[in-house]
Image (cartoon, helix red, strand yellow):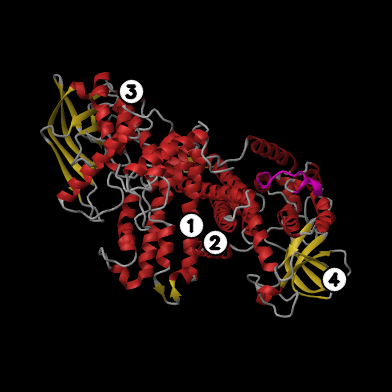
Amino acid sequence: MNFDFSDDQKLLRDQARKFLQDKCDRKSVRSILEDNQKNYDSDLWSQISELGWTGTAIPEEYGGLGLGMLELCVIAEELGRALAPTPFSSSIYIFAEFLKSYGTDEQKKKYLPHIASGEKIGTFALSETNGKPKPSNINTQHATGKLNGSKNPVSDGESADYIIVAANSDSNSNYNSLSLFIIDRNDPGVSISNLDTIDPTRPACTVDLENVACERLGDEGSGWEMIDNIFNRAAVLFSFEQVGGAQVSLDEAKKYSLERFAFGKQIGAFQALKHKMADMYVKIELARSNAYYGAWALSTDSNELPIAAAGARVSASEAYNYASQENIQIHGGVGFTWEYDCHLFYRRSKLLSLNIGSIRQWKENLISNLEKRNIV
Amino acid sequence: MDFNDTPQEAEFRKKVRSFLEANAEKRSTLAAKPKGDSGSSISSAGAPETVKGEDAAKVALDNAKEWQRKKADAGFAAILWPKEFGGYGGTPIEQVIYAQEEHDYFVHSGYFEIGIGMLGPTMMAWGKDEDKKRFLPKMITGEEIWCQLFSEPSAGSDLAGIRMKAEKDGDEWVLNGQKVWTSGAHFADYGMIVARSDPTALKHKGLTYFYVDMKTPGIEAKPIKQISGSANFNEVFFNDVRIPDSQRIGAEGDGWKVSLTTLMNERLAVGDPPGLDFDQIFEASKEIEVEDGLAVKNSEVRQKMADWYIQSRGLQYTKYRSMTALSKGQTPGPELSISKLVTASKMQDVSSYALDLMDMSGMVHQDQNPILKNLFQNGYFFSAAMRIAGGTDEVLRNIIAERVLGLPQDERSDKKLPFNELPSGKN
């Protein structure tokens, strides 16, 4: 049994943690939160790009470091701990993974080196309306090499240079109609308007498309299949971010409960709070273990991935939501002030539990994949 | 990252498998096989069974003893014990591997777990050489069964609050009082007991540890019928029970220290309670009809089941993390401390929800119950006990908060006063 990260991977984790403690403190997170003009921390982005983090799991022939998905999981956890305000997830977990899995060699050569170097940023545009994206509510249309429609919310859309757009390539709007297309955001037909989000350090926008030139990514009509696969991969990576953030929420709750005195003692000595923090610990450990299993499935290309990813996603989303919400509760009155940091985690946890589909949706994915496996 | 055995582990597993294949019957049906890896169980009785006749109990015990004998002959009965006492001289990971493999077979090792897992190690650490030579080998072979006489009516979670009197009379001790929740007292040959030898000393200082022959005059075990209808535990009464001082284990007044050795080993033994789990309700949901068709197709049911799945597998993968540490010869982190806390509540939630799905038929508690043979009805009762036995949910949360997270201990009024001056609610 070797269900753990290797010594090298742990070393990478320590280095990443130390680097982010230095370069991504709460002040820099807040500088993005409080500045409407800034979508992400561009200094931090260039530094982590220089360190090669953006190219971690991109093959060397396309300009990456050619390390594995486990290394990317390690980095994801640290980015989550630090609340890093960068488009890392959109560009690396999603855009790069789409290209790696479905791009032609030509497309990989065209896009991946720029993504790996961090000089360009990619993202993905799927949702168009309230509720779960599904064939009946995707109206963006592809015809004769042009895209027309409107997407929102699109994570990191304002920062992106390239956007993968999900659009119907025939007029049926059914499961087999969806295809994926890559666009350049500088195309004159693209207009972008910013949307406020529950966590302004992770921005989103509306992307309107009017006769936008595009190139197809992957097979025509297999859009949903590709999205499922890439979201499964991203879910594992996000689950590490979430575990990282949840752990810091617990650590900070604990720290405060030892500093704050009431009724003549540390509030962390009251069982009501001790038991709450024990429950946070339980959920986080379950989430960490589920995330590890996801990491194993991801790194070995196991056919367990849909189940492992959904388990990791649900467990991590629930743990982070709980930990960040109870962190506020343990802080009491100051917990809901702008000044204290609790809300940074509260915002981030909820946003991360929605961005590639809700907990509800992933629970449904989990059970339907378990049903499929049973039949096989 | 992989789930593979090391070459040595694979070799050991192969040995275990060939022993089990040759000597035991493999489990097959889902209902009879709660998912999980290890075969150790929370009490000697393991999964709930309705009380049967004395004959059935005797047959079960005889079968278990026969199995234990075979295990001992093959060297697998006490993997962690040193060879000099008949053990395997193995490592924790080998013990886990054995338990994983045995779990797939219809065998009952539960009767011997308290002895081999907890009491034997206590005797090895604190006992006299002649006692070790006399008792340990028969503990392994199952010829003599041991029980643990710790809890009392007024000392459960607060174990050091025991009141069983031990009064010295020449070379003898006289024991008076009552023990409770003693698994297997009615069939055990020997027991280990902690009693209060000095009520004027501080609570943790006035205790002394002994072993007793359960046939000593004055000892009477009475089964406790639980809400499940089973009787897995006993209350045990001591009336002027005289034992020689040679049956003392550890020094007079050292009873608490000796007990801690026993209890530390309990945490290893009581890791993986038998389970009614995600797999069982997932199967059942394919048979039960709710308002809009099969339960498995109902969105609320699916949402709930997903929660149990992540708890169930989360625990399994947590165990893999601990096993990884064991496999590398390291001490596992504290992560496994969550195991029973999560398992017991999950079992209660799963069984209560399954009964709700069954609607009116959920009321029926008969062996011919069509849905997985009463599994959920039994689990409904058994899980209530599981949330208490081996550390209540509340005690476990305290342990996580204090020992894992390092939060302050509860303020206590019982550490500074002599035991007989402590508030007890009875004076």
Q: Are marks 1 and 2 in contact (CB under 8 Å)?
A: yes
Q: Which residue is mark 2?
A: A366
The residue located at (42%, 63%) in the rendering is: B283
Q: Compute the Cα span from label 1 to label 3.
A: 44 Å
| Category of crowding for the residue at label 4, using alpha-carbon neighbours closer than 10 angstroms: few (below 14), some (14–19), many (at least 20) | many
Q: Which residues are magenta?
A: A58-72
Q: Which residue is mark 3?
A: B84
Q: Foreground residue, B304 or A332?
A: B304
Say which amino acid is labelled 1. Answer: Tyr
| Disc number placed over residue A212 in the picture, else none | 4
User: On screen, A254 above or below B361?
Assistant: above
User: On screen, B302 above or below B35?
Assistant: below
Q: Which residue is mark 1?
A: B309
Percent from the top left, x then y, of residue B253? 27, 24
| Residue B278 on the magenta span | no
Q: Are labels 4 and 2 assigned to the same chain?
A: yes
- Mark 1 and mark 3 lie on one chain; the one further toward the N terminus is 3
Chain of the residue that carries numbered disc 4 in the rendered image: A
Name the secondary structure under disc 2. Answer: helix
